[in-house]
Image (cartoon, grey):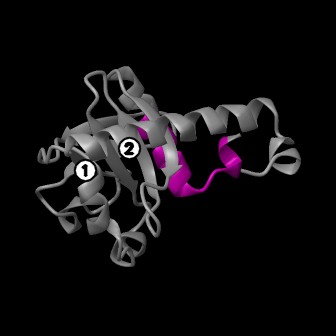
Amino acid sequence: MSSNLKPGQLLARGTCRHLRDLGFACVEELVPTRGLRVDVMALGPKGEIWVVECKSSRVDFQTDQKWQGYLEWCDRYFWAVDADFDTDLLPPDSGLIIADGFDGEVIRMGQVAKLAGARRGALTRKFARHAADRLHRLRDPDVGVIFRP
């Protein structure tokens, strides 16, 4: 299975596994608002929301023009990279996760920027709908052909 995954997807998988061990539920490729798609959004046991962007190379990081737009959609922001990535490229006030396709580890916590209550509620509902839709499509792959939202 892992041979079909791209490097960023492998980072996301290892990151999600680690965050699950910390009590977070994770979804990949969630769209918090038009024009943005986060690699991993994690919902913590106290309702905290973390966003993790997975970068598989220097070029991947340097060509990302949207990452600062993700900051207003989370309580903490993280980068997930592999052990060979030059972490000096990353902003020092953001969180850092070192990951591979099997696991990860939080190396540095991102700064806290608490979401407003209304945004947190809306984002939590979007998270739940995204996760339920993913599960539905997994259990019933033809649902997109039969039903259109």
Give the structural element (helix, strand or loop) at label 1: strand
Residue sitting at x 32%, y 23%: 22
Above or below, comparing residue 99 to residue 71 in the picture: above
Report the Cα–Cα distance between label 1 and label 2.
15 Å
Q: Amino acid at mark 1?
A: Tyr
Picture disc at residue 77:
1
Left or right side of 145 for 104: left
The residue carrying mark 2 is 123
| Extent of the magenta region | 2-16
Give the structural element (helix, strand or loop) at label 2: helix
Picture disc at residue 24:
none
Q: Position of residue 98 (x, y in %)?
A: 32, 44
Relative depth, front residue between 144 and 118? 118
Q: Main secondary structure of the magenta part?
A: helix
Query: Splitting the image into 4 quarters, where does residue 1 fall?
Result: top right
Left or right side of 70 for 41: right
